[in-house]
Image (spheres, rainbow, N blue to C red):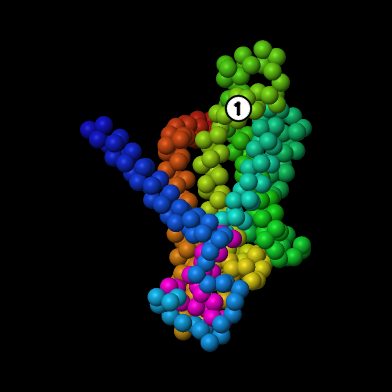
Amino acid sequence: MMSETRSSRTAIKSRNLFIGVALTSIFAIAALISLIWTPYDVTQLDISSKLKSPSWEHLFGTDHFGRDTFSMVMVGAQTSISVAFIAVGIGMGLGVPLGLSAAAYRGGWLDEFIMRGNDLIFAFPSLLIAIMITAVFGPSAVNAIIAIGIFNIPVFARLSRGAALPLWTRDFILSARVAGKGSARISVEHILPNITNLLVVQGTIQFSLGMLAEAGLSYVGLGVQPPIPSWGRMLAESQTLISIAPHLALFPGFAILLTVSGLNLEGDGLRDLLAPRIRTKFNQQLHSNSQSYQ
């Protein structure tokens, strides 16, 4: 009975990962193809073909400027994925070293400085920070990347610090310290490889959140600027035409929904496959904390 339960759970985990990879691959492939080819030029206006319904000529119809919606969704995938990927890369590239440094010098001034800085950023909603930055420095793809990346830094810093702290008490770390290795070398050679699984899973989750943030910024006009298509701006432009041309909102909306859902399923599957003991350790920690408060 136990083996059947475990096999069914493994099947569910594999299915979630497969579905997530399949969904994200569709839009990733579309984004790659759009680099070299799209059915129509997304910058070319054709007023005589405006607001056409989906057909064999235009699979997703056309917008109020006569642009092919299918081509815009393809290029929009490229925009959303590239912005979110670079933003997560910034967050991981800066947040992980900060978190490892804070864990290496736990209780010191560096640890306090890093963690209080994280608390300061977390005190503001992520989308509000992004809107403030892009409003001050101007709407553009670069500013959107910076705004989204700034909020990702404390996420990875906290995760790295929390995962690294228990490892510093392990025997193999104590042996490395006795061998004369410094804190920086131990963090790179011993700590980082043991928390990579957590970082990969969190990176997938932050990727989906980054795509939502990019869509939100573009929706309010603070993200990628015309003539480059963006799923968020496509939704914003379609809101006054949804009664006569609902396809203008449906296709970019479903693109966001399916991509984010795929990334979440992928992250869930990766968490179960790469780090199956994360939940157990977390529950044990919660149980021990609850007992300490009693």
Asked if residue 68 can be seen in this view, the reply is yes
As drawn, 141 above or below 45: above
Q: Is residue 125 magenta?
A: no
Q: Residue at x 43, y 80 (%)?
A: 53
Q: Residue 276 in the image: x percent, y percent?
A: 43, 34
The residue identified by callout 1 is 191
Q: In this image, 84 relative to 10: left or right?
A: right
| Rendered image quadrant of residue 178 | top right
Q: Residue at x 37, y 42 (%)?
A: 13
Question: The magenta stretch spans which residues?
Answer: 59-79
The answer to whether 274 appears left or right of 87 in the picture is left
- Where 112 sits versus 66, above or below? above
- Residue toward you, 43 or 250: 43
Decide if residue 40 is on the left or right side of residue 189.
left
Mark 1 Cα-neighbour bin, 10 Å: few <14, some 14–19, many ≥20: many
Please identify the residue farthest to the front as the structure is shown.
36
Amino acid type, mark 1? Ile
Q: Residue 10: give x, y in percent of width and height.
A: 33, 38
Residue 69 covered by magenta stretch: yes
